[in-house]
Each structure stands twice: as structure tokens, then as C-alpha cells.
Amino acid sequence: MKRDNPNQLNFATSSSSNKGKMWCEEQDAGGVDELFAVLGYKVKSSDMAEVAQKLEQLEEVMGSAQQDGLSQIASDTVHYNPSDLSSWLESMISELNPLPNFDPFSSVVQDPFLESSTVTSIDSHSHNSLNSHVRPQISAANQQHMVVDSDFGSDLISIPGKAVYPTSQLQPQPQHQPQTKKLKSSSYSGLGNSTTVSWGLPNESISAQPIESPRPMLLVDSQENGIRLVHTLMACAEAVQQQNLKLAEALVKQIGFLAVSQAGAMRKVATYFAEALARRIYKLYPTNPQDRAFTDLLQMHFYETCPYLKFAHFTANQAILEAFAGKSRVHIIDFSMKQGMQWPALLQALALRPGGPPSVRLTGVGPPSHDNIDHLQEVGCRLAQLAETIKVEFDYRGFVANSLADLNASMFDIREGEVVAMNSIFELHQLLARPGSIEKVLQVVSEMKPEILTVVEQEANHNGSVFLDRFTESLHYYSTLFDSLESSGGCDVGGGVVSDQDKVMSEVYLGRQICNVVACEGPDRVERHETLVQWRTRFNSAGFEPVHLGSNAYKQASMLLALFAGGDGYRVEEKDGCLTLGWHTRPLIATSAWKLR
């Protein structure tokens, strides 16, 4: 996925909703097999036996051909991808048949998941290995006969597997080395990465002079496969919505094969969505509620990797700080206490306030612990030590609640003369899983008469009633998020470097959200994100009006992004008094502030 073109995926999916509707029309019109038609291959049902026979012949030919028949190359050439599968197989067999004793996997195998180029050539004099991207392309046609009857366990493993967490494999070099050939180096940047690949003996300089290959070349186009991957994802989601589980099962397995030919964000996003679709098809739903301690740990890695949570904390704190101006007694009620990462910065800002800091009460709300440890109390102790160090009068209480809807106003001990600020970061959307919960919580908030209510939520609509619409929106949203994560690898963030562990754990954090959005339904589907427009309607109905976030928050948030690789790609925008942070042109999270009318 190219970083400078975030709408590339959107373009690729623009016609996918109509694609599935064409299968039946094509099949009725010409007897074309629908499973192959989804992937762009025209194979008549009457020709299936012949195609299967040719596939067997091709496998036999490839197994008996000598190992110097194929070599891996990279090129930005326009590549050929066959639509007439039967004729293409015939030509492949005739081309490969003269080659004796060919073993495509006996020489050095480069990790296909770390390659940004996915082009393969046939050269009768080369001893380089076959790029493993070709194997899925050749064997995928056989899946129609095996996908439905296969055991699910191994199929699901084949979907996330190495496509998400690649590991390099190196096999021994063949003992016989051919005479050095001079082949040109080529670069390919179809997915935002640029890779130069050269051929010849190890540690030997190779001049970039092209030679003419004595045999024709087979080129597999990664960009073409990328478009097919998106189309297959959409087609699978449409089959799920139509309860055509046999077709959905076949398609979700094709997604795994297509995903491995991609690099970077596209491969990872497709893998997580494929896993979620597989769970929905086979009814292997993730357990809910999720392990909150593990989720909090993942969120901390997400906090370190990219600016979204930092932006959320900073903009909310700025609004609260301005609401506390001139107040001597303040009370903060945090619906999303987690590890308390938001509050040290606010306490330090209050300590530096002209005229001295106010007296601060902090009430944190969190879920029950499963390890018999009072994590909320631990967070409170650390914040109390900080407050003592910077000489801020501080009082803390923690409340354990399974849901915010279980709270009532009397629990918070609101005292006369203190100014109340309430805060929620990525929490309110979970209340939408149970009817009436969000209305009850907003009623409790209004009873406490806060000076300000700060809310940060994902800027997305993942709460629609139509599964296919929800799937399409979430595919676009998380593709953009993963694209921004790809840019964070190895860059300086706040004076440090993003570690591989932080990045991988952040991807797992988002992957769990994808799984919940796609695989779950009913009360178990808690990731019910809504847009700022939808939240505005809810707050207006509950008697709240917006508080415009000041220009200072906008300017300082823009400065915050400078810590993330110069802020390249990230965009802060002001929208009707609220602030959004996005990647290129796509807003991803929104901060808003509210008060009672």
C-alpha cells in the first residue's frame, strides 16, 4: 500500500460490491465456474475435468524439471495474468516439459513475505529458486475441490500464519555453481517499498547489462493480485451476508493464498480480516469479555508506536485545563482509567499554573481484575507519589465496574464548590452493544453537572445494521490505520525509536478490534464505533452542547505530530469545534468537548 496514495485501496474496492453480482450472470450466460470467476479466471464447468488433468500434468512436469529452470527476478514491467486458464496451463506444460530433473525448491529460498517484488521468470540456465508467490497462483485452482472438505483447524492456521509474522528460511546452496550470468538489477515499488534485486554468484559484482533469456518468461503481477485480493475479500463478505457459506468458505481460503503475495500493510490487513471472516463462517467466535489486562498491555504498545492515543490525551487535557482556569478545587472523573497514562501531564500543567495549583480529586473507573490485584489502586499510588513530588494536593479513588452503565451519580461524592470534569477515551462506543446503556450513562453525567465532558472516539461507522456495509467501512478504516503503522517502523518517536515489539503488539491490538467488528454480533460485538456526526446527535438529544476546542489545542497538537517522523502523513483538522487526527485525507479519531445546555 503506497503511503502517498491512501485512497488506492478505496479505488480498488469501488466496484467490488458489483463484482459478486456478476458471477451468477456470467455462469448462467456461459457456464463459467463461479469460484474461478471470482478470481478472474474463465473456466467452463464442462472443462473442469480437463483443467484438473492439466494441473496434475503441470505438477508432474515441475516436479521432474531440473532446478535451473526457474529464477526469481523483479521488474516493474506490465505483467501477464491469464484469464483462459486451460490454454495457459497447456502452454506452461509445453514450455516446462523439455527441462529435465527440475526441482523448484532445492536451491536457496528467499522469504517471500519479506520480498516487495513478486515477479518470477523462467531461465533454463539459472540455478536461482522459484519465488514462492508462483506456487499459490498455480495451485489455487485446485482449491475448489478441497476447500470445503478440509479440516478447519489447518485452514485457519494457514490464514494468519507467516503472512503476519514472517520468518526467514535459508536452505543449503546447491554444490554445483553455474557460470556467472550478467543480469540486470530491477526495482519494484508497487507497495510503497523499493527493493533492488540482482542475480549471480554470491559476493560477486554483477554488471547491470541485460541479456536475452533463452526461454519465455512467466510473470506474476503483485499489483494485479492486490486488486484480486480486495475483490475476494469483498466477495467473501457478500457471500457471508447472503448466507452462502460454501462459497464464503472457498473464498476465505483463497484470501490466504493471495495475501502472501503482498507486502506491508495490505498483507497484514487482509490476514486479520481473513481470520475474522473464517471465525464468522465457522462460528468460532472470540471469547468476550476479552482479557482486559492483556488489552491494556496491547494499548500501551499502541501508545508508544503511533500518535493517536497521545493526541487523544493531549487534546482532552488541554480542554480540561482551560475549563479549570481560575478554579481552586477540581474533580476529574475518568471513565477510561487504564494505566493512568493521561494524568501525569495534566498534574504537571496544573502545578505550573500562575497563582498555584488547585486541590485535585481524581476518580478512576476500570473493569474488575482477573488476577486478584487492585490495578486501579496501584495506578492511584503512582499518581499520588507524582503529585507529592510536584506539590499538588491530591486525592484519589478507584471504582471497579463491569460496565459504565452500572454507575450512578451518588457513587462519586460530588462536593459543593468543586468543578467537575469528566473524561472518556475510546469507551462510550462499547455501550452501544446494549440498548439503553448510552442513554443511562449520559443521564448520570448530566446529574453530576460537569463543567466539561471530553470524549475521544474512533471516527468511523462500524455500527451499521448491514454486515457488508460495516465490513467495507472497517476494511477502509483499518487499512489506513495499518498504513500509518507501517510508516512508524524504526522512526524516532518522542526521542526514542519504535521497537519491533511495539509495532507487532500494536498490530495485534488493532487485529483484535477487526475480529470483534467482523466476527461477532449481538452484545459480544462491542467495537461499535460511530462518527462525530452520530455522536453529536446523541449528545444534543441528552441536553449537551459542544465546547469549541481552542486554537491553542490545534497548534500544539500539530507540534506533537512533529515528533513522529516529522509528522509526515498525519493530519490534524478542526471540524465544527472538534479536532480530528487522520492519516493523509482520512480522519481516524476525533476529540470533542461538551457541556450541559
Image: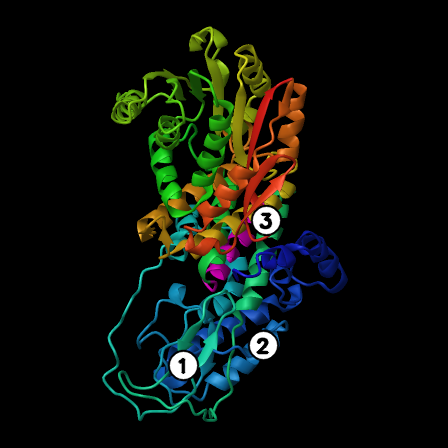
Q: With respect to residue 466, does 3 lie above or below? A: below
* Residue 130 spot, x, y in % from top left: 40, 76
Highlighted magenta segment, given as a residue range: 245-262
* Residue topped by disc 3: 586
Look at mark 1 in the image and give the residue it sits on: 71
* N-terminal-most mark, 2 or 3: 2
The residue under label 2 is 80
**Along the line of sight, which residue is nearer the eye, 133 or 329?**
329
Find the distance from the CA under tag 2 to the CA under tag 3: 33 Å
| Pointer 1 with pointer 3, Cβ within 8 A | no
Please, what is the three-letter code of the amino acid marked with disc 2? Tyr
Mark found first going from the N terminus, 1 or 3 = 1
Front residue of 416/521: it is 416
Secondary structure beneath disc 1? Answer: strand
Percent position (x, y) of residue 497? 32, 53
The main secondary structure of the magenta stretch is: helix
Q: Secondary structure at mark 3?
A: strand
Furthest residue in direction right, as rendered? 29
Task: Residue at 29% x, 66% y: name it.
Answer: 169
